[in-house]
Amino acid sequence: MSNDADRPIAPAGRLVPARCSRRCWLVSAAAAWTVRAAARDDEQPVIVRQPVPGGQIELQFTPGFGDAQRERAREWVVRSADAVAAYFGRFPVPQLELLLQGVDGEGVIGGATFGEPTLYMRVRLGRDTGAAQYRDDWVLAHEMVHLAVPQVPRAQRWLHEGIATYVGPLARARAGLLDARQAWRGWARQMPLGQPAADDHGLDHTPTWDRAYWGGALFCLLADVRMRQHGSIDRGLQQALQGVLQAGGDYRVAWPVSRTLAVADAAVGGTTLVDLYDRMKDRASVIDLDALWRELGVDDEQLRDDAPLAAVRREILA
Ligand SMILES: [Zn+2]
């Protein structure tokens, strides 16, 4: 079963609603330490040090995993890390502690990422999760994408969630873990969630779940299309975000959003992100999505190569 472009809403067959924690990048340092302290001396986690492209992940399994269960989970971590590393050019950070909190049953339940006091990620999952379920999981890639963006002020959490929501399925699809056509059709169905509602005052002032995840993802899609449409077709959001990472902008640092967007713009030339942010930050800016899908050649039946922006669509995800 596909996750249809990784909408952060529970696909059928999961234990509980699977979504990135709404607080996934804002949880306090104290909360992170509380989780770690919960592993008592007689319940030490099993540690596996896993090299990934450009870094290392310290996998911490809570007690109760069997050898085969641990190996399936390790393979899933490697696959997710490879997909994210391929998008950004390397794994976003040199070192990550990843706590895998096992529970009875199947399915990846949810994840959370903490920037302090050290870089730390926690994912809850059923110990009996099968290979196919791991393959369909969006949670871990989503959390790993968060690592590639500087922390931002609370008003711009939508940017962080938007990037993770948009890039997660792109990275997975490019790695062959998600079908490209399903990814586009999933976006066509889900991006409308990110449109402003009647009482909306712009992305910076409307901290709802839909606007944070899908409003942010829509911002990313628009930016990606415009960069490739008006600049060089092979330089889009991916290259812009790689520029941020190369400038030291990963989750271990906190930047004002103006700096993150300016560094990203500079990496591809132009001012696409800064301009789009100006337009969408404090105004209810409704996007003509039907027109956008038509131009990109995304319809219910197929991806159309005779559409005016079909080449842009293929550059984003073919
Ligand atoms: Zn998230």
Image (cartoon, rainbow, N blue to C red):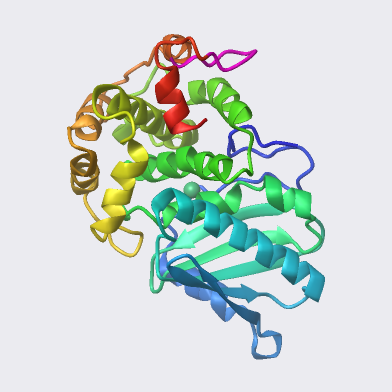
Q: Is residue 93 left or right of residue 204?
A: right
Relative image position of residue 76 (x, y in whole percent)? 66, 59
The residue at the point 42 percent across, 14 percent down is 292
Image height check: is 309 above or below 31? above
Residue 19 in view (yes/no): yes
- Residue 214 is inside the magenta segment: no
Q: Give 310 or 10, whichever is nearer the viewer.
A: 310
Segment tinted magenta in the rendering: 296-304
Relative image position of residue 299 (x, y in whole percent)? 57, 13
The residue at the point 64 percent across, 67 percent down is 100
Relative image position of residue 222 (x, y in whole percent)? 36, 26
Quarter of the N terminus within the rendering: top right
Total numbered circles: 0
Residue 202 in view (yes/no): no
The residue at the point 70 percent across, 90 percent down is 42
Give the quarter of the image for residue 190.
top right
Relative image position of residue 273 (x, y in whole percent)? 25, 34
